[in-house]
Image (cartoon, rainbow, N blue to C red):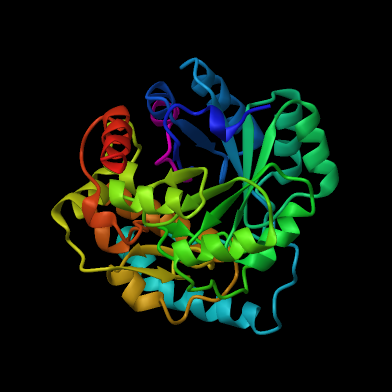
Amino acid sequence: MFSLQSLEIPIIAAPMAGGVSTPELVGAVGAAGGFGFVAGGYRTAAQLSDDIDLAQSAEVHFGVNVFLPDESPFRPDVEAALAVFRQELAPIAEELGVEVGQPVHDRDDWAAKVELLISKPVPAVSCTFGTPSEEVVRRLRAEGTAVMVTVTDAHEAKLAAATGVDALIVQGPEAGGHRGTFLTSDLPGTTPLLDLLAEVRRVVDLPLIAAGGLTNGRAIRAALDAGATAVQLGTAFLLSDEAGTGPAYRRALRERSYADAIPTRAFTGRFARSLENEFVRRFHKIAPAAYPSVHTMTLPIRRAAAVAGRAEYLAMWAGTGWHEAREAPAAQIARDLWEDANR
C-alpha cells in the first residue's frame, strides 16, 4: 500500500482538471521524488484509462483523482435561476460564435471510473466533492490502492474517516480551483489552512495533506510544521513546462493581467478561485449553485474563448499565491520549493 512517508520529497502535484494536469506533469514531479495525480474529472472512464496508460509510461508512482457526484436535489428556485443565467450568457456566446451549452446534470462517469480503478489499480486514488462509500473504499484498498478524500472542514473530515480512508487532503480557502465541499450548495469555510489543519487533527487521526496557497518554501514548511505529512500544490505548477495551461491563461499569469483571484460560482456552479476577469465580474452574483449544470452551460464559451485568446472569458483557476508561479520545468520547481522549505 502506498504511503506518504515513502516520498523522497513530500510534494504532490494537485489534479487540475480540464487539461492543466498532464501525464508529463505527473511524471516530472514523480521523477523529482514527489507524487502526482492524474486528473480524472471531466474525463470518461475510457479517456481516464488512456491517461493512466500514459502516466504509467513515466515509470513513477502516481495517483488518480475522481469527482464524486452530488446526489442532493436542486432547490426549487435553481431551474428558474438557470433560465435567467442562460439569457445573460447568450450575448457572450453569440459574440464568440457559439451557443450556450445545455445544463446537463451528469455523474461524471463515477460508477464506470470505480470499476476502471478496480481493474486497473494505481497506488492512490483521491476523491473530490465527497467521500466514497465504505464498500468502494474497501474494494479499492483490496487492490492495494490508498484512498484519500479532500475535506474543507472538520465535519467532512469525520465523515471521510468513518469510511476507512487512508489519508485526508485538507483544503484551505487559499486554494485555487474548486473547493472540495461535499455539497454544491454549501458555502465553503474561511478558516485559514494552518488553523484548519489543527481543527481536523483534533477530530481524526489520519495522515493529512495540506492544500491551498502553498507556493513558496516558507508556506510549505509552515504546513508541515502544523502537522501535515505532505503538501499538495497546483498553482505553483501552472506555468511549468509540462502543464497544459493554455496560452491566454499563461499570459494572464505571467503578465499579472488581473489584480486578484476570488472564489466564484460563475464558471461551474461550484465555488472555485479564479482570476477576477470580466466573466467573473459579470456573472459572479447570478450563477446559481448548480454543478455541473453551470459548467456544461459555460463550457462552449470557455472553449471558444481559449481558441480566440480571450482571457476575459476564461476560467483561470489560481490560488492566493498565484503571483509566485514561475516558468520552469516541473521537477525543478518541486526541488527548488523543497530546498527553500528546508533552509
Instruction: Check the picture and name the quadrant holding the C terminus.
Output: top left
- 254 displayed left or right of 110: left
Determine whether 199 is above or below 171 in the image: below
Magenta segment: 17-26
Give the residue at x 64% y 37%. Answer: 125
Image point (64%, 78%), residue name = 79
Q: Is residue 260 above or below residue 319?
A: below
Which residue is most to the right? Answer: 135
Say which residue appears at 45% left-offset and 28% top-offset. 23
Q: Where's residue 177, x and y in %?
A: 44, 57
Quarter holding the N terminus? top right
Which residue is nearer to you in this view: 60 or 93? 60
Place of residue 142 in the rendered image (x, y in percent of width and height, measured from the top left) = 81, 29
Is 22 covered by the magenta stretch?
Answer: yes
Residue 332 visible, this orientation? yes
Residue 321 is situated, as x and y percent measured from the top left of the image, at 29, 57
Magenta highlight on residue 341: no
Looking at the image, which is closer to me, 42 or 88? 42
